[in-house]
Image: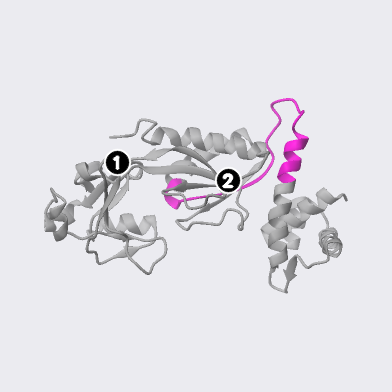
Amino acid sequence: MNQMDTLKIFQRVAELASFSGAARQLGLPNASVSLAIQQLEQMLGTRLLQRTTRRVQLTPDGESFYRRSKELLDEFESLRGMFRAGGQPLTGKLRVDMSSAMAREVVLPALPSFLAQHPQLEIELSASDRRVDLVAEGFDCVLRTGTLDDSSLVARCIGHLVQINCASAAYLKRHGVPRTLEDLAQHQLVHYRQVLGGRSPGWEWFDGRQTHTLPMAGSVTVNSTETYYAACQAGLGLIQLPLVGAAKRKMLDGGKLVEVLPQYRPAPMPVNLMYASRRHVPARLAEFMDWLHALIFPLTQEGGLTR
């Protein structure tokens, strides 16, 4: 067993948090997997995995080694494929993250056709509104909407999502339809925060040059897209959401939700693919990101979705 094989074994154990699970997936005896990890730890002079009767988890040294070894294996795969003829099948595993709404409404419905073209590819899809740490958590790429806050990553802009202002018909019947910014003083906003403990800045609108905010009252603050939409449909207040989300869920059909103040929409929301800065991007990652770009671009302002 060469060192590259040992690294692959270590990565699979780390990802599955299981020696026996890694052995099954790799088609190796349990003893061979245990021995490979033991020899790797002896060679490095540190413990990489903490083993108990119930679980296997990475030590701090193991987490650092996992990130570096993943980069090394990806680099090796790129080097190995430099002189191959085209048409080679994509293999290996991709770990990606995106919002739950983007995963459910856009990516998952189209994913079967992509995997049918690449049957040897595995995808681990994390879907939540939490901002993951791409490097620390071992993601190959993340799809992020909104303002970027990590300059250490490579950003590939797909486009911008048009945003609209909505309320439920029942809410508007009770409180009236706002016509001006001054009217918002008599209305409630459903506040959205990724981390609870505060409120959003308030109502946002874009004048073509800059974003303005207006503090608004609101009885409810949520931290997920699902509860944000549900709170609006329940009549708890106004929300500001991407047009594509409303369109995919047919929220504007039949008056479930009603657009208000179209002249005071928020700024279009940027959509970016983020990945670690590497000299060689693995073929499987490059192909997947190209596919995501082609899938999402038509849903952006640049792709023609403006309403």
Q: What residue is drawn where x is 44% and y is 34%?
A: 297
Write the start and end of the magenta stretch as one range: 73-102
Query: Looking at the rendered structure, which numbered label has been put on residue 248?
Result: none
The residue closer to the viewer here, 280 or 290, is: 280
Q: Secondary structure at mark 2?
A: strand
Horizontal side of residue 256 vs 149, given as left or right: left
Q: What residue is drawn where x is 21% and y is 52%?
A: 168
Does the CB distance between marks 2 and 1 fall below 8 Å? no
Q: CA distance from mark 2 to mark 1?
A: 29 Å
Q: Which percent across, then down, holds residue 38? A: 84, 64
Residue bearing mark 1: 209
Q: How many marks?
A: 2
Q: Amino acid at mark 2?
A: Tyr
Image-quadrant location for residue 233: bottom left
The residue closer to the viewer here, 183 or 120, is: 183
Q: Which percent across, then down, holds residue 295? A: 47, 35
